[in-house]
Amino acid sequence: MASLARTVAKSPLFFAFPTRVVASKYHFHRRFSARPNVPVFAPLDTFPTRHIGPNIAEADQMLAVLGYSSLDAFINDSVPAHIRVSDATVSEQSISALSESELLSLARDIAGQNKVYRSYIGMGYHNAVIPTVILRNIIQNPAWYTPYTPYQPEIAQGRLESLVNFQTMVTSLTGLDISNASLLDEATAAAEAMVMAFTGSGQKKRTFFVDSGVSPQTVAVLRTRAKGFGINLLVGDVFEALKDSKVTSDLSGVLVQYPDVDGSIKDYSELAATVHSLGGIVACATDLLALTMLKPPGEWGADIALGNSARFGVPAGYGGPHAAFFSVTEKLKRRMPGRLIGKSKDVTGKPAYRLALQTREQHIRREKATSNICTSQALLANVAAMYAVYHGAPGLRRIANRVHVMTQILKENVESAGFAIINKDFFDTLTINVGKVVKDAEIVHQASVAQGINFRKIDERHVGITIDESVKPADLIDVINIFNTVASRAPISLSNLTSPTTPSFPDALVRTSEFLPHPVFNTHHSETELLRYIFHLESKDLSLVHAMIPLGSCTMKLNSTTSMIPLTWQGYSRLHPFVPADQAQGYARIIKELEQDLCTITGFHSCSLQPNSGAAGEYAGLCVIKAYHESRGEGHRDICLIPLSAHGTNPASASMAGMRVVPVKALADGSLDLVDLKAKAEKHKDNLAAFMITYPSTFGVFEDGVQEANRIIHENGGQVYLDGANLNAQIGLTNPFTCGGDVCHLNLHKTFSIPHGGGGPGVGPICVSEHLAPFLPTHPLVATGGSQAIEAVSAAPFGSASILFISWAYIKMLGGQGLTDSSKLALLNANYIAHRLRGHYNIRFKNVKGRVAHELLLDLAEFDKKAGLKVPDFAKRLQDYGFHPPTCSWPISTAMLIEPTESESLDELDRLCDAMIQIRKEAEDVITGKQPRDSNLLKNAPHPISVIALSDAEWNRSYSRQEAAFPLPWLRERKFWPSVSRIDDAYGDLNLICECPTVEELADKNLSQAAL
Ligand SMILES: Cc1ncc(COP(=O)(O)O)c(C=O)c1O
């Protein structure tokens, strides 16, 4: 299938009727409306018709409602002419479309170009064994992979409970008090720990010491992050360092790895005491499976434990995505980065989960934020949590024990063959000195690769081997016999193996404490039980399988099945990120083509796919800008201008990259205040580093002045960072380069169709102009980026590599014309909603032609003034209608931001509009006094079934149960029930409980329920 294009070209039938003729229904319709017949041999499964919701007749209907006779006339009124790009920019010529079956066939060919060897490379990445019940029912299940971050907890109790399981699993295994619900990867988690140590010292102590046993990719990311904060990062033997007063006098903390990258296990308890006596923090990178056998970090004095949870059922996927974990002691809990799920209660007193301490998020702290986690890794955290639920403590112990015993057997046999093992104490990793047997370790690597096996390349004398759950006895024999062959010894067979009985680490480090005693980890061990638990949780959550999720600035569009299916094929899922390049040729092709297509779309020169979230992309882009200024001897440039309306991640990223944030005002019509911008750019011209702008603006409009704004910045020596989260409005119509940008990030988990996973994974690549290309990030193990590259921003060279496939497939299946049509229809859908809601709601910002961009901002301030109804009242009532509420209270506190995307059909848009209009009527009843202000359909929303089922005596409301649950006729047929009533946010923050119930708590609950 690599030769699809050639095969097609040779076929006369396809020649006569090329695929691209029908690649886009809108294009086809407009160009060929005089001969509407589709050529008979054209593919039957072209993607644009499946991806774009409205069909041609519906699009025409919407255009007519808006008063346009053509899509082009509508687009001309929506997007300013001076920023438009030519039709050829993103077209079938620049990106030609493949049908779904053609794409799958090509995907199979490309997977075949990846060599799936057995990798024993370790370094934090393993061949996970994914229980098939989890594979099929979570990883491959849209009800789990399509929801959004659980900001609306009443319709997200399922995944909130699962994330609490993740938190409980992490605290229990690490022996610490509290854990968050995932971070992006192990290396960035380590960077968060380093910054916590720095801020914990009041930003006074600048030295952070990293032990030489920490993985090199972690050290690289720490170096990048340390720069922005002015932290003095030292790497070496941590025990020696603590004897040096130059280090100890300024020490904010240390990072150790347990077991370390070479496999050694050291006792850090005395070291922890010393660091504490100096007022510092001890952070420990660790491995959850090892902690089933090893004394947990919390028991020997670590303040923070962090790492990668992927070996709990998450495919290696050439580096990601996976969920990093992060747990801390009680005293650090309010400073912990990332999302934390906590227990609260709803208004009826029923226990319920929610995102805790949301006020710490970047939107509140903005440039004072020292961490910038928005999208994280919820889906993968759920997978890891379910893995622990399924296996329970006994199952995990068995897996760990087998891994350890195999490693012991390997050690014995490798030693017998004459090699020396460097690390006496180990769990699953051996560092082998080959010097006594062969001159160069390369001889061992050649012998292993010849057998389809990869070992870790350390240097010319040392080889590393890590054993994992996937290793079978026959695999172990193969590994042992590579050493026997190299040492010219006879091979052994299974019958030669004997298993040791005592662990290969000191008694003092043997785990004696129990873990995972909670009922949830001791109940669902049969497949039937786990299947039912997964579906029980799933039934509580609203996802794209139920209805549209019109979250502004989030672009919740179709995540097509065809783009998801290949992800779990072995050719993509089983590659270790550090395999030799010749084994990852398939990935190399996907990466190269995706980079090229993203450059075509953005107008930029080069791309880095390494950042694994939008916020990480912002940070990477700003670091690139800083490096550029430094290369010109202008390293002092550190002022970053940011509009007040910007997403909170913008100022947080700027401050993390070592910039000072200066806010820029907006005008009353929502556009950028160019006078203020000019004044500030000129005032700071000697130190101006960057300007960050979101386009179309966060208010949902294409501002005319974007090029003018960017010209002002360039004239004053700054670089323009364009936040590309809203790229869905731009493709084929305009692009960040034409708007005057130098760098932009893209949220592939928005515009480019990677599912949101209930709060991650994401991918936030950056695209840059030619002059910034040399500074794109590299990686210590697989070189990436430019000639003067900044150091790594993520643990893996290509970040969350496996899901790059989704965006690659999305682009290939839509083709240039389909991509452009998608943006056009995204604009049309948003403007249709704006049209239907006008007169009912105040649509805050439009352009001079009365058009919004791909999203619209409804200002609800009037309802608060007239009837005390606030944004959450409208949002929660929408849940009763079966919809996920739009983005609430951002970028204006009294507003809702609605983004429908192109994937929603006219029918679905009408359902949403009908619901919004009906809610407006319900609000009117409160305004006119027909319904009381304190107890009405909006204030009491949502209405779960437990409330609707109250007895007549208990139902003391001024409206009927029917009005509450079935306010519109279609709800009788298609009802999604929120599982709890409105949740009390303040209670949850005051009484922070972030773990699963224990046996005792459950017993109490059952008793009190029995009493009812
Ligand atoms: C405008 C804007 N910028 C940046 C981001 C951050 O992206 P991520 O959540 O992937 O970190 C978002 C996410 O919602 C956004 O809407």
Image: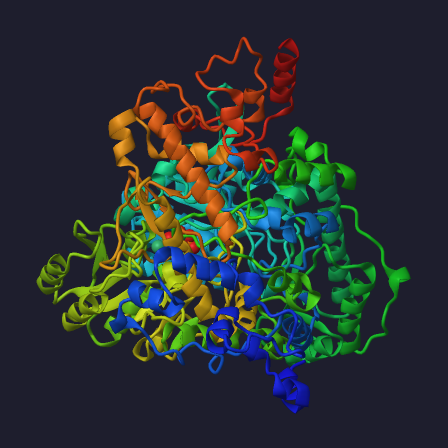
Residue 381, percent across and down? 57, 47
Relative side of 867 to 186, left or right: left
Q: Quadrant of the N terminus?
A: bottom right
Residue 612, percent across and down? 46, 59
> Which residue is outermost to the right?
495
382, above or below 785, in the image: above
Q: Is residue 546 visible?
A: yes
Q: Residue at x 68, y 74 (%)?
A: 105
596, above or below 276, in the image: below
Of the pair 230 and 752, the residue shown nearer to us: 752
The mark tally for this picture is 0
**Res 630 → quadrant:** bottom left
Of the pair 371 and 562, the residue shown nearer to us: 562
Q: Is residue 288 visible?
A: no
Residue 571, percent across and down? 68, 69
Q: Residue at x 64, y 79 (%)?
A: 442
Q: Quadrant of the C terminus?
A: top right
Quarter of the rendered image showing ligand 1: bottom left
Relative side of 773 to 797, left or right: left
* Coloring applied to the structure: rainbow
Relative side of 499 to 704, left or right: right
Relative side of 473 to 511, left or right: right
